[in-house]
Image (cartoon, helix red, strand yellow):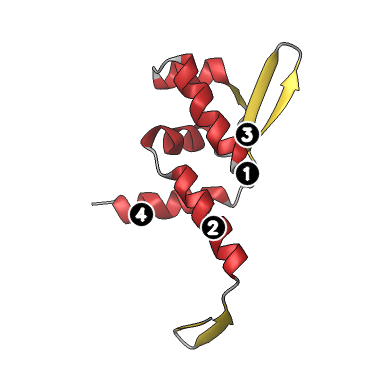
Amino acid sequence: MRYICTHITMELNVEILEQAASTLKALAHPMRIAILNMLEGDKRLTVTEIHERLQIEQSAASHHLGILKNKGVLQSKRDGKNTYYFLQNEGMSKILDCLGRCNAK
């Protein structure tokens, strides 16, 4: 499969496209986008901090964090009794910036 865009021709790798679609699907929820916004800039937060700031149930925050972690968007690190969540890749900030620009009025 080939794709031509403004004088650039590149081969499309189906596996990479499927991975990208899976990642975007994981982002397709307002609470998950809010979580990612909270974690931008190398921030690390616990599920308690996230659920309190978003004013949602802790189980709901855990559910969203699990989806984001399973799709490779987030990582976590245990420190004593707490587990801290953070962005797997700061490149995710570019996607969030793009979403913000696309929705700007």
- Label 3 residue SS: strand
Query: Answer yes or no: do the residues labelled 2 and 4 have beta carbons within 8 Å?
Result: no
In the displayed structure, would residue 66 be above or below residue 10? above
Local packing at callout 2 (Cα closer than 10 Å; few below 14, some 14-19, many 20+) is: few
Residue bearing the label numbered 3: 86
Given the current orientation, which residue lies at the most extreme bottom position? 7
If you read the primary sequence from the N terminus, does the residue marked by circle 4 or circle 3 appear first? 3
State how far apart marks 4 and 3 are (Cα).
23 Å
Residue 24 or residue 92, whichever sits in front: 24
If you read the primary sequence from the N terminus, does the residue marked by circle 4 or circle 1 appear first? 1
- Label 4 residue SS: helix
If you read the primary sequence from the N terminus, does the residue marked by circle 2 or circle 3 appear first? 2
Query: Answer yes or no: do the residues labelled 1 and 2 have beta carbons within 8 Å?
Result: no
Q: Is residue 48 left or right of residue 33?
A: right
Residue 10 or residue 89, whichever sits in front: 10
Identify residue type, mark 4: Arg
State how far apart marks 2 and 3 are (Cα).
19 Å
